[in-house]
Amino acid sequence: MDESKQEGAMSDGQNEMEAALNLEESLGLGLGGDARPGDILRGRVVHISQDGVLVDVGAKSEGIIHLRDLSHRHVERAEDVVQLGDIISVYVLGYEGDEGILKLSKRRADEDVAWERLDEALNHNEVLEAPVVEVVKGGLVADVGLRGFIPASLIAPGFVHDLQPFLGQTVRVRVVEIDRHKRRAILSRKDVLAEETRAKQDEVWSTIAEGQILEGTVKSLTEFGAFIDLGGVDGLLHISEMSWNRINHPSEVLEPGQAVRVKVIRLNPEKGKISLGLRQVEGNPWDRVSDQYGEGQLYRGRVVRLAAFGVFVQLEPGIDGLIHISQLADYRVGHPSEVVQVGDEIAVKVLQVDPERKRISLSKREADLEGGLDALESPEVREEASEAEDAPRKMTAYHAGDWDDEIDGDDTEPQ
């Protein structure tokens, strides 16, 4: 071989070596002879099989990653984690077999990065988003680049009975403890929820004012009222503020989860208490009673309550009147039950309307003398009744006013 050919061959060899070194440098690959257990190298996926993945890290032969070493999650198929040609980081576990095949782990390399990320999140009190991948005894396993554990006591402020609904959810957590040597990462969802709740409470208290109409959700019902979620702050809707009607239990008006519009009646920032009203949003039906009920006119009503001194009759939701026992019939009545029963539909005549005292005095006796229910069946009355039935029903029911407080209990008719 002449001198020119020898120089050409040497030049080609140098070019190939430089190209190989450049490729190795660009991939961050270590030379095969330098691969030692504990090293983290970069390599290219060159083959995928049912048992694992072959990765070229610049060694004399490819290294192998078994399925169990591909991810901290359970892996059925390698293709679910890597694809041919992917450049990945791998951790050198050692060598296996008679031929000394390089044994690698993508999972360990990923976890090393994850530990650094968790350490940073812990130091900066950072919130992480992590999918829940498993429900285990005592808590949840969340994917934070490795298996992070959320104890049941740190899932929510209250006790969580059923953990299964969290599976597959992405939750916001803080790192509360890490021990890399024990491969332990403890996470808390409760801390994040508590902080978010405090932020919402601060926002609500900075804007809320008495007299405001707010949108809320019924959180729970009690014997004395309902707690309404106003978006991070709970307000109390007392049973007496739910309806213009007399009600025995809040469930007659509301149900958990129901969206409602409520009025802020009173605020006590020092104690963190908000008193709400529901009936105030609908408006007091007694404000328009003078326009709707004329003295001397006949109306249809329903008996809603009996008392020793008379009968309470509902004229419409929110409005009821009193028939004194002396106005029940044209004969002496010993007790109202001798004439009517709760639920009866009767005709009544308006004797007197007193909006300020929330009273309407009625007479069944005089209505009967003028034809009773039959008199209300005239075409004009039927048309009015039809219009009343077609009118939208209000959410509030009726309120009986203060009759019981102002009647002394005798059988005399109130003046």
Image: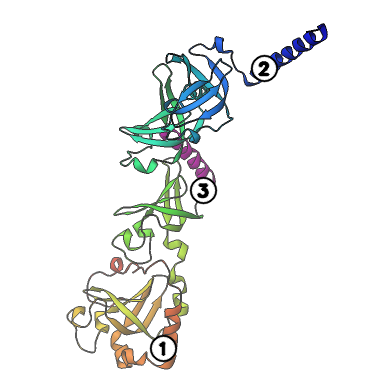
- Which residue, given by chain and number where applicable, does mark 3 sit on? 208
Task: Report the span colored magenta.
Answer: 189-209
* Residue nearest the viewer, comparing 152 with 341: 152
Taking the image as drawn, is residue 71 in sight? Answer: no
Spatial separation of the CA atoms under disc 2 and disc 3: 69 Å
Q: Does the magenta stretch include residue 391?
A: no
Q: Is residue 196 magenta?
A: yes
Taking the image as drawn, is residue 141 in sight? Answer: yes
* Residue nearest the viewer, comparing 361 with 204: 204
- The amino acid beneath tag 2 is Ala
- Which residue, given by chain and number where applicable, does mark 2 sit on? 20
With respect to residue 163, does 330 lie above or below? below
Secondary structure mostly taken by the magenta-highlighted segment of the chain: helix
The numbered mark, 2 or 3, whose residue comes first in the sequence reads 2
Residue 353: percent from the left, percent from the top? 40, 78
- Which residue, given by chain and number where applicable, does mark 1 sit on? 382
Point out the residue furthest to the right here: 4
Q: Which of marks 3 and 1 is in front?
A: 1
Q: What element carries label 3?
A: loop
* Residue nearest the viewer, comparing 122 with 138: 138
Image check: 241 left or right of 346?
A: right
With respect to residue 81, does 57 lie above or below? above
